[in-house]
Amino acid sequence: MPRPAPPARSPRVRRLLLGGLGLIVLLALAGPTLLSFTPIPLSLIADALPAEAGRLGARSASLSWMGPVAVGGIELRDLQGNVIFAADRVEIAGGLLGLTGGFRGSKSSPLKVRVDNARVDLAIGPSGTNFDPLILLLQKKDAANPADPSRQSASVQRPRNIEVINAAARITDTTSGAQWIFEEVSVNLADPARGVDAIELTAAGKLSAVPTPGNPAAAGA
């Protein structure tokens, strides 16, 4: 006796299945963009820095699979709450796929980073600088959690192009109280990942000394 044929799916069921599949594809494509409107990216940025090293924060984050990945309003504060680094915008070209090597050949293409309106407040004293506690803590963290050699070598070998636009820095000698100001600083760094000798670095800016009671004259450069 022949088996009865299975009942055909109704057009409504097929439409629901196709609609569900289309929704899944749409969410996958738009996932990074939708994630940008949630607190998750900013929480990840804040958690990237150990609490004992200071506080890292940002005002906004924009994610995309293929478009630029950007973070706006970055601030790095020391343990006393002073802002020691800030930038209006940090942008990485190529999207998440390019950043993670998802595109074919993207691991060999330069990682392009652009930093707009960065501001640095550097204090130098007999015991070092105000950035030393952060640097030492990160070095200890790297020593305690060594990276996978295969991943580390792939990261080191990737070329990088870093462009800094309209940056400024204040350097303070905490012993004498003298201060110097760098303004309108532009930096271009091209690292083809072929060793230190192959790195190309160009920089320009204006340097001036802040007048103090003991040294009222300001030197320009």
Image: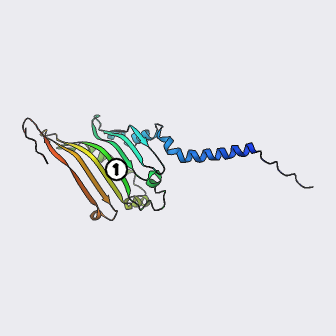
Q: Is residue 105 above or below residue 181?
A: below
Residue 60 x/y as whole percent: 40, 39
- Relative horizontal placement of residue 84, taking residue 153 as reference (left or right): left
Residue drawn at x 37%, y 54% is 112
Residue 175 x/y as whole percent: 13, 40
Count neighbours of disc 1 (C-alpha within 10 A) and say few if under 14, some if 14 to 19, many if 20 or more. Answer: some
Q: Is residue 84 above or below residue 108?
A: above
Residue drawn at x 61%, y 44% is 23
- Relative horizontal placement of residue 13, taking residue 116 as reference (left or right): right
Residue 185 x/y as whole percent: 23, 48
- Relative horizontal placement of residue 112, taking residue 80 as reference (left or right): right
The number of discs equals 1
Q: Which residue is mark 1?
A: 114
Residue drawn at x 36%, y 48% is 141
Kind of residue sitting beneath label 1 = Arg
Secondary element at tag 1: strand
Residue placed most toward the observer, 64 or 148: 64
Residue 144 x/y as whole percent: 38, 50
Residue drawn at x 48%, y 61% is 104
Please name the colour scheme applied to the rendered image. Answer: rainbow
